[in-house]
Amino acid sequence: MTEKELLQQKENHILKLEKEIEKWKKAVKTQHYGLVWLDVPEGFEDDVENKLPILEDVPTKGIKSKDTEPTHLLIEGDNYHALTCLNYTHKSKIDVIYIDPPYNTGEDGFRYKDKRILDKYPDGTDVPKDHPFRHSYWLSFMRKRLELSKDLLTKDGVIFISIDDNEFAQLKLLTDSIFGETSLLGILNWQNKTKPVNSGKAKYQIQQNIEYILCYSNAIPKEKYLGFVLKEQGQRKYNFQTKKGLARLVDIEDSDIGRKKRDTMKFPILGVIPQTGKRWKIGLQEVNRLIEEDKIIIVEGKVKKIIYPEDENQSIERPFWSLLLKEQVDTAEDGKKELSLILGKEHGFDTVKPTKLIRELLNHFDNNIIVLDFFAGSGTTGHAVMQLNKDEDTKGSRQFILVTDNENNIMSDICLPRIKTAITGYNDKGGLFQSVKFYKTAFVGKHNILDADDKDKILLAHHAGEMLAIAENTLEQVKKNDYWQVFENKDRMTAVYFREEQNKLDEFIKEVLSLKKPVTVYMFSWEERVEIADFEDNKKINLKTIPQPILEVYKQIYNII
């Protein structure tokens, strides 16, 4: 080991110790208010403590449709590992996150992979579901993933989190601490079922038919909801005939009481002054402009503003109400029937989120957003996104990213087949005809993120191509050899020279210069920057380095575990 590597190793050990000290400081700090629990190490940490996570393309499981845009992403693997990779590829790029995590009911199959405690006792019997650490396990599990998801959101991105009574109180305190209390946009109440439970303990309790959806934004709403305005077309009526055509009339008087009082807004307009207790909504300069444009009229002694259809977006805004009834968004029972139509009745899911629920949430946003669900389950979110893209009234180019492991074959037998069937069509429903790329989480190297040596970095560069393509949204690989890869979409390309050896660099440069589209070039480099004379002053080429920028993102993540 070189002197430089020894020095780097010492610095990394110091970082580890500092991290451990901070962790213990937090553990012993007295909190007057907030959520306190025993943070339990998770089994997956063995992976990220000894290897570097990557994403690998699995071409045989991808779905290529005749429609090329958008191409969606399915990722199979532990969502912590996937979120680690996405923090490089999609930092500050996700517009909406929807997740339906395990509710920790004791019956939902949630098992925390405790790093220190086996899931079975020495005699082979299972550790009880209602373990003393039950809530600590769940909170430890959720905290890690929510912290990683926060940095994926755009500056005004939004996250929706479904939950029921079992962990609602704990989740609310946890999400307040991660996203901030002032970032809470509200709590939705979804009518999830209509049939009562007629057996067991639940029969004699209050029957719950409501689940909750917590909603937070990275930005704080001020004068409007961030994205939460649904446009309803064709609602305004233009029934006042003028010499220029049909228009509508709007009253420009406002209250002049309390905080609304404005003496400067009581001037005469065409000889009319506001009524007692009233004042104008618009100022003198705006009034003069409207009079000049012949858009002010007196009707029955009242001043009205004339508005023509071409003056405005012909729609109205409605609030995003917190109550979501079955008539509007369906129930979990409907979601189960929907899944049965696609996969048959033996799919094994008792409750399934209906696509109408996810559509209602997403329909409050633009039609070209990126949507992430890292508890993808049966794939409802992906199905809903594709429906919105296809439907005439909501048509767009939304892109989904779904993440789930393959525990109990949920990816191979449920999520992937559902997405495939939705694309090709089922039960007399036309196909949605969109494309999907399939990836798996994997690992390279022999050391953890902080102790990565030169061999680890070389291996990371050799296997980073798919992640770089995802980061640039150039998902189709068009060329690969032992030294470089080239990917593209309809507008741009990504070229990756991933070898330390430079004996094929001239060929690579020639290849890049021959590309017809704008291209992002990634070059292996031990330095933070790299300069290639042939690329200078070429506005079509954007030059970046690997693998160090990937490692820097991973280091930041490692220090918050």
Image (tube, rainbow, N blue to C red):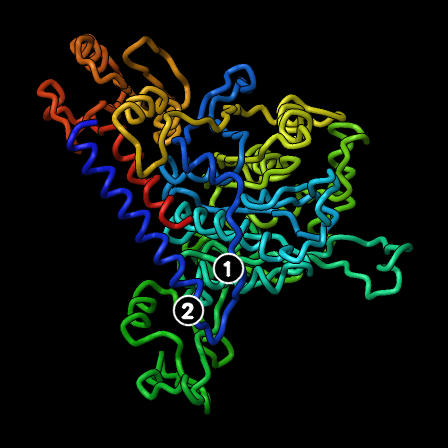
| Residue at 33% in and 63% down | 293
| Residue at 47% in and 67% down | 181
Q: Locate residue 430, reporting x and y percent.
A: 67, 25
The answer to whether 415 is drawn above or below residue 131 in the figure is above
Residue designated by label 1: 175
Query: Which amino acid, by three-letter code, is at mark 2?
Result: Lys
Taking 126 as reference, is 114 left or right? left
Label annotation for residue 304: none
Q: Locate residue 504, reporting x and y percent.
A: 20, 9
Q: Residues within 10 Å of mark 1 (few under 14, many from 20)?
A: many
**Closer to the N terminus: mark 1 or mark 2?**
2
Query: Which amino acid, by three-letter code, is at mark 1?
Result: Thr
SS at mark 2 in the image = loop
Q: CA distance from mark 1 to mark 2?
A: 20 Å
Taking 18 as reference, is 241 left or right? right
Residue 104 in view (yes/no):
yes
Q: Residues within 10 Å of mark 2 (few under 14, many from 20)?
A: few
In this view, the residue farthest toward the front is 122
In this view, the residue farthest toward the bottom is 276
The answer to whether 509 is drawn above or below residue 304 in the figure is above
Q: Locate residue 161, reporting x and y percent.
A: 57, 52
Q: Locate residue 521, reporting x and y percent.
A: 24, 23
Closest to the observer, 96 or 201 = 201
| Residue at 47% in and 40% down | 45
